[in-house]
């Protein structure tokens, strides 16, 4: 009988608890460590920025008016769909409600230690099978007490939207306006009539620049990608990335200058961080977490240490679920892990393919995009379970990607319906 620790009670952590509870014949103790007072992780909105009421770094980057960039029809965990709603792209509060319903349906709150900080996770030599035991030292923020527990397996679900990447922009200290990271963006009112630069054109950069453009005089979306083909708002213009700042002037990589800029919003992503892990070989250089097999399994601890949710540009809740099915197949000895060298070889081949064949930078080590479907097939084969992703779900995901590229400002008004496992339609 296994004792399983789960770090974080966001979507991935709740899914981990659900699968741990489902393995009650092999799992006897489940503890979910959550440093805030409620479940939901990044889907919990707060007006606060930077730190929470306990002085700890905020883990949520949610902004007030955010709507999902995927339709609810494909967002749910397998076997637990979102409730019916007249919209496909829904407000973040409805996702939080969904996670609360998920936790209630599976009785997960009983396992959560709220307002508890994990200070350290360390492999220990105690016990008959020392290699598989983990010592977790934690603190109750409410009571001020410290606890030490031993577990057979640790599932890391601490998210990766809490430590912003702050680029080193020449002259930024001379900027006469304000500079903020999207992590601390909450709403657009304070940008009224401003001239704003948004640096970075990932999902948040696009969404936030569109929000700000609704009230600003001019917004410049600065990035290093090929220009988006989609029409944008009249006062939202794509530009090359930043080179330097001087006063209220921003100089771009092509040496063009943008004058009278009052705010720079850094939509530059986040670091992967696991500050509680001690005595574990783990590197996170260039946002590549290694050594991991299948972006999930630590090669030195293949039955007992897992990192859920690292892949991006995926169907997140479904990806969590499939990763966790494989993790629990390993934890409960239903399948054997590959030998260590084969896992390391897989990781190296995957990285070389990304950087040489696909031409991606190292920071895209966990990017999946169109490769996610084969990734899920591979995990299901390794774990010997049925892949829950239907062709209707993958087809709808891909259709939304195309719709987004055609109409960034308007695609969230589209409505979809899953007809069966093979078909969907746009309403």
Image: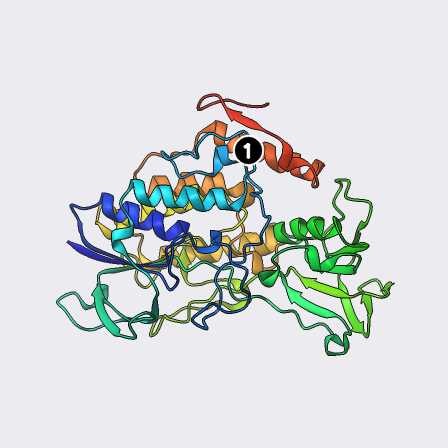
Measuring from the top left, give residue 200's x and y in whole percent.
68, 57
Could you tell me which residue is drawn at 12 percent across and 67 percent down?
128
SS under mark 1:
loop
Could you tell me which residue is drawn at 41 percent across and 63 percent down?
291
Q: Specify few, some or many for label 1: CA neighbours under 10 Å numbering under 14, 14-19, or 20 or more.
A: many
Place residue 261 in its image quadrant. Answer: bottom right
Vertical side of 199 occupied by 139: above or below:
below
Q: Is residue 199 visible?
A: no
Q: Is residue 316 left or right of residue 30?
A: right
Q: Is residue 28 left or right of residue 37?
A: left
| 159 or 368, nearer to the observer | 159
Vertical side of 270 occupied by 205: above or below:
above
Measuring from the top left, give residue 64's x and y in whole percent.
58, 52
| 318 or 354, nearer to the observer | 318
Q: Is residue 149 left or right of residue 392?
A: left
Measuring from the top left, give residue 343's x and y in whole percent.
38, 56
Measuring from the top left, give residue 117's x and y in whole percent.
35, 69
| 367 or 50, nearer to the observer | 50
Please give the residue where the numbered disc 1 appears in the rendered image: 88
Number of numbered discs overlaid on the protein picture: 1
| 301 or 305, nearer to the observer | 305
């Amino acid at each position: 009988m296994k004792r399983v620790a789960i770090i974080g009670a966001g979507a991935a952590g709740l899914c981990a608890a659900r699968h741990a509870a489902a393995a009650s014949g092999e799992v006897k103790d489940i503890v979910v460590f959550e440093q805030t007072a409620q479940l939901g992780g990044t889907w919990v909105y707060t007006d606060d920025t930077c730190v929470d009421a306990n002085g700890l770094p905020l883990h949520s980057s949610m902004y007030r008016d955010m709507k999902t960039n995927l339709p609810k029809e494909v967002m749910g965990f397998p076997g637990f769909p979102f409730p019916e709603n007249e919209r496909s792209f829904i407000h973040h509060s409805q996702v939080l409600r969904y996670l609360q319903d998920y936790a209630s349906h599976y009785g997960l709150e009983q396992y959560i230690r709220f307002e508890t900080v994990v200070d350290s996770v360390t492999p220990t030599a105690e016990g008959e099978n020392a290699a598989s035991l983990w010592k977790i030292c934690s603190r109750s923020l409410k009571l001020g007490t410290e606890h030490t527990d031993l577990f057979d397996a640790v599932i890391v679900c601490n998210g990766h939207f809490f430590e912003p990447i702050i680029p080193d922009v020449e002259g930024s200290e001379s900027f006469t306006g304000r500079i903020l990271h999207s992590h601390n963006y909450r709403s657009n009112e304070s940008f009224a009539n401003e001239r704003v630069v948004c640096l970075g054109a990932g999902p948040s950069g696009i969404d936030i620049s569109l929000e700000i453009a609704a009230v600003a005089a001019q917004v410049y979306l600065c990035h290093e990608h090929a220009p988006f083909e989609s029409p944008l708002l009249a006062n939202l213009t794509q530009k090359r990335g930043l080179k330097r700042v001087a006063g209220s002037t921003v100089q771009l990589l092509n040496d063009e200058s943008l004058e009278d800029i009052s705010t720079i919003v850094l939509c530059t992503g986040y670091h992967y961080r696991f500050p509680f892990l001690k005595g574990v070989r783990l590197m996170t250089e260039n946002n590549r977490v290694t050594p991991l097999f299948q972006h999930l399994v630590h090669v030195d601890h293949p039955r007992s240490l897992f990192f859920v949710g690292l892949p991006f540009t995926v169907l997140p809740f479904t990806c969590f679920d499939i990763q966790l099915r494989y993790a629990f197949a390993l934890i409960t000895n239903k399948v054997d892990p590959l030998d260590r060298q084969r896992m390391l070889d897989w990781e190296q081949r995957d990285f070389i393919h990304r950087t040489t064949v696909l031409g991606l930078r190292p920071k895209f080590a966990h990017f999946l995009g169109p490769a996610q479907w084969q990734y899920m097939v591979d995990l299901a084969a390794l774990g010997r379970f049925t892949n829950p992703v239907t062709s209707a779900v993958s087809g709808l995901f891909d259709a939304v990607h195309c719709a987004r590229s055609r109409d960034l400002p308007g695609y969230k008004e589209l409505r979809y319906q899953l007809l069966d496992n093979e078909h969907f339609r746009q309403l």
